[in-house]
Each structure stands twice: as structure tokens, then as C-alpha cells.
């Protein structure tokens, strides 16, 4: 827990609204393997992390709601009965979207005040959006006794992203943020929304994220485009989602597909298998196999699904060329953000120093390094 942020959010709420708030932590997430399989009803392997959104919330007697983003030093005031999406890319849409989805369910919400701040690095692909959505729905559920289960809450968060943000995300980000468990990764079946927790002992290896500090502008449109390709291929195969396809099935319609779309669908089928094999590797404490699967995942994301970029490929290639990183891949939607790495603890510092220098020399910008731990999901702070 970041006590400095907790204190800051609490003090700002007291100072601004002259009342004690309910305090909530909602974590960001990593995904060890299983990328772009969630919206194909497949398997993913995420975990919540010890970085996230810290929110302070309470009821108000005002006839409007106030939400303040301390990181951006901006605020919004709105009336619950009169909300609509704001300009694309604004944080306000995550808050407004959650409220709108609750109203669609005929949930009775009063006016409220909200202040939040996070320590998830911007553009890192660690799902700060899902963490914010979850903190809002969790807080409102608590304040107004809405009686929602955690599972109902994550679908509200997901729909907020679909309908107010315009990103047709799967359920992984919201699930991992809400249901995370300290020291565990979750093998999540995105069709049944059932997860099996796997305790992970990383032994002599450290989980490290390296942020490219780039976010290429085509990311959201390309994400939605790939989702459409997957849905079209599933329709041709007469199945509900690519989760049900095998490579053999896919080859029966190969002549109907462009090579590019064939490779995208093939990647999803293969990545789904890798996520399941990763669970066996963890069960057997076989970190070397887990690492090899991570490298194969990145290769597919880069060459088949085409959601990587030069900066991500550079970092993974540096990891692969070393003898201290047993697994690395890009993480998240793509076109920027982080790589996730399993690095030998004893040689971690020297690898990171050397790689950071090479990255800066090559791209004329610096990368950032984050050490993360698997954490508990969205919860009240005492």
C-alpha cells in the first residue's frame, strides 16, 4: 500500500468536502500470458498488483456529484439524471459510464463526492481504467447498499468501457483488478468467468515491468479491428468464439481468409493453448517452461497478431539475448506500454542498467522499470 497516496487522498477529501470518506484501493493488473484471448472467450493468466487507484468517496447533500482526479488536477460536476459521454479519451467517461450502467439496472444512487489518485504508470498497459471503474462501482455499491456481487460489478465496469469509452475490452482487466489474490495468479476462463488461483513462487526470479514510455495512436482502433476479425472468423467457422476453434478447423476456411487475418486467428488459437500450458508449468514449478511460453507469446503478438512495436520488440530481444531473463513478452493491448520479464534476482540490476542505456541510445528516450508484486483485489481500506 502506498501510504503517502492514501493520506493525500484522505486529506484532500476532508479539506474539499469537510467530511470523512470511505477509502478504497483498486489495483492495476499484470497478465503473465494469454493476451487478446479474453474477448475470444478463452483463457488468460492475470494477477492484481500492488499499484492501483486510491479512491475516497462519500454521499453529499448537494444536488450534483463531484469527481476530482488529483493526478490530473481536474474535476467534473454532473447531475445523475443528466449524463452523457464527454470527449474521447477523458477520464471522466470511466466514472460517468459506471453511473450510467448502474442507472440502466434501475439501481438507486444518490449524489456523491469522489477524489482519486493512482500510482499505476500512465500508458503502462496495467489497466488503470479497469481499476478506476472498479473503485467507483465498488464505492457506490458500498455507499448506497446496492447489493451487487463482485461479479456483477465487473460487468458494470466492462460495459462502462464499451459504451462510454468506446473500447470493446474483454473481462480480464476488470476481473483481475476485482478478484486478485496476494501471491497468486488467476487462470481465468473468460467464458464461464471462473478462475483457478495458482500460488506462484518465483524462487530466484524477479517479476519486472519495463515501460517503453510510448503509446502509438492507433491502439484503440486497432484493438477494435482485431476483435472484429476474430468475430468474423468465428462466424465463418459457425462457432460462438475462437476459443472453440482448433488449428485444423481454421485450416478448413483458410482459402476464405487473407493471410493477415488467418495469422491473427491462428495466433489466438495458439495463445489459448499457451495459457493453459502455463498453468501446468506453474503447478510443476517449471519457471523455465513458463518463460519459454512467454517468449513464444511475444513472437505471436509481434509477427502474427501485429500489435507490437519496435520499442517492445527491442526490449524482448534484449531479454532473449541475455542469459538472465528466462521469459519476456509485451503485455496489454499493444503498440506501446510494458514488457513483463522474469529476471534472475542476482543479475537483475546489471541487466536493467545495460538494457536501459541501450534503449536510450537506440530510441533517444528512456524506458522506466517497475518491480511489482501480486496483490489483493479491490477492497475497502480500514
Image (cartoon, grey):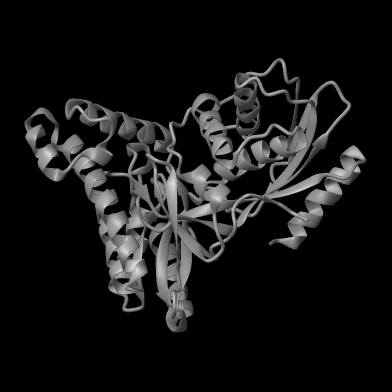
Using the image, determine if residue 110 lies above or below residue 299.
Answer: above
Quarter of the image containing the N terminus? bottom right
In the image, taking residue 115 as reference, residue 358 lies left or right, namely: left
Q: Residue furthest right?
A: 18
* Foreground residue among 116 and 185: 185
* Foreground residue among 319 and 28: 28
Using the image, determine if residue 353 lies above or below residue 8.
Answer: below
Residue 47 drawn at (x, y percent): 49, 56
Quarter of the image containing the C terminus? bottom right
| Quarter where residue 180 is shown | bottom right
Q: How many marks?
A: 0
| Quarter where residue 41 is shown | top left
| Quarter where residue 22 is shown | top right
Q: Residue at x 14, y 38 (%)?
A: 250
Q: Residue furthest bottom?
A: 346
Residue 252 drawn at (x, y percent): 7, 35
Residue 167 drawn at (x, y percent): 46, 31
In the image, taking residue 233 as reference, residue 215 lies left or right, namely: right
* Foreground residue among 53 and 350: 53
In the image, taking residue 108 as reference, residue 120 lies left or right, namely: left
Using the image, determine if residue 329 lies above or below residue 69.
Answer: below
Q: Residue at x 55, y 50 (%)?
A: 179
Residue 15 drawn at (x, y percent): 90, 44
Can residue 304 be seen by looking at this rendering?
A: no
Can residue 79 be seen by looking at this rendering?
A: yes
Q: Residue at x 53, y 63 (%)?
A: 374
Amino acid at each position: 500500500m502506498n501510504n503517502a497516496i492514501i493520506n493525500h487522498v484522505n486529506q484532500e477529501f476532508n479539506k474539499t468536502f469537510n467530511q470523512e470518506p470511505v477509502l478504497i484501493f483498486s489495483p492495476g493488473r499484470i497478465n503473465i500470458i494469454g493476451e487478446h484471448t479474453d474477448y475470444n472467450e478463452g483463457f488468460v493468466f492475470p494477477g492484481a498488483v500492488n499499484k492501483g487507484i486510491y479512491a475516497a468517496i462519500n454521499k453529499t447533500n448537494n444536488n450534483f456529484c463531484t469527481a476530482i482526479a488529483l493526478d490530473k488536477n481536474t474535476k467534473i460536476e454532473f447531475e445523475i439524471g443528466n449524463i452523457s459521454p464527454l470527449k474521447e479519451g477523458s477520464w471522466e467517461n470511466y466514472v460517468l459510464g459506471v453511473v450510467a450502467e448502474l442507472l440502466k439496472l434501475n439501481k438507486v444512487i444518490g449524489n456523491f463526492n469522489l477524489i482519486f489518485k493512482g500510482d499505476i504508470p500512465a500508458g503502462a498497459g496495467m489497466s488503470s481504467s479497469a481499476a478506476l471503474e472498479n473503485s467507483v462501482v465498488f464505492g457506490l455499491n458500498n455507499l448506497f447498499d446496492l447489493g451487487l456481487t463482485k461479479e456483477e460489478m465487473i460487468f458494470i465496469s466492462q460495459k462502462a468501457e464499451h459504451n462510454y469509452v468506446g473500447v470493446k475490452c474483454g473481462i480480464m482487466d476488470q476481473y483481475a483488478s476485482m478478484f486478485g489474490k496476494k501471491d497468486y495468479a488467476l487462470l481465468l476462463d473468460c467464458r464461464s468467468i471462473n478462475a483457478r488461483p495458482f500460488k506462484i513462487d518465483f524462487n530466484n526470479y524477479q517479476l519486472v515491468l519495463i515501460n517503453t514510455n510510448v503509446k502509438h495512436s492507433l491502439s484503440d482502433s486497432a484493438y477494435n479491428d482485431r476483435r472484429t476479425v476474430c468475430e468474423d472468423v468465428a462466424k465463418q467457422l459457425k462457432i460462438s468464439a475462437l476459443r472453440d476453434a482448433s488449428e485444423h478447423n481454421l485450416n478448413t476456411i483458410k482459402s476464405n481468409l487473407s493471410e493477415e487475418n488467418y495469422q491473427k486467428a491462428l495466433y489466438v488459437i495458439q495463445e489459448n493453448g499457451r495459457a493453459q500450458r502455463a498453468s501446468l508449468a506453474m503447478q510443476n514449478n517449471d519457471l523455465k517452461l513458463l518463460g519459454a511460453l512467454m517468449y513464444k507469446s511475444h513472437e505471436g503478438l509481434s509477427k502474427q497478431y501485429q500489435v507490437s512495436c519496435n520499442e517492445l520488440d527491442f526490449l524482448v530481444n534484449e531479454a532473449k539475448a541475455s542469459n538472465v531473463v528466462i521469459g519476456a513478452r509485451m503485455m496489454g493491448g499493444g503498440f506501446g506500454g510494458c514488457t513483463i520479464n522474469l529476471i534472475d534476482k542476482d543479475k537483475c540490476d546489471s541487466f536493467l542498467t545495460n538494457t536501459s542505456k541501450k534503449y536510450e541510445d537506440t530510441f533517444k528516450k528512456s524506458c522506466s522499470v517497475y518491480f511489482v508484486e501480486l496483490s489483493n483485489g479491490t477492497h475497502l481500506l480500514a
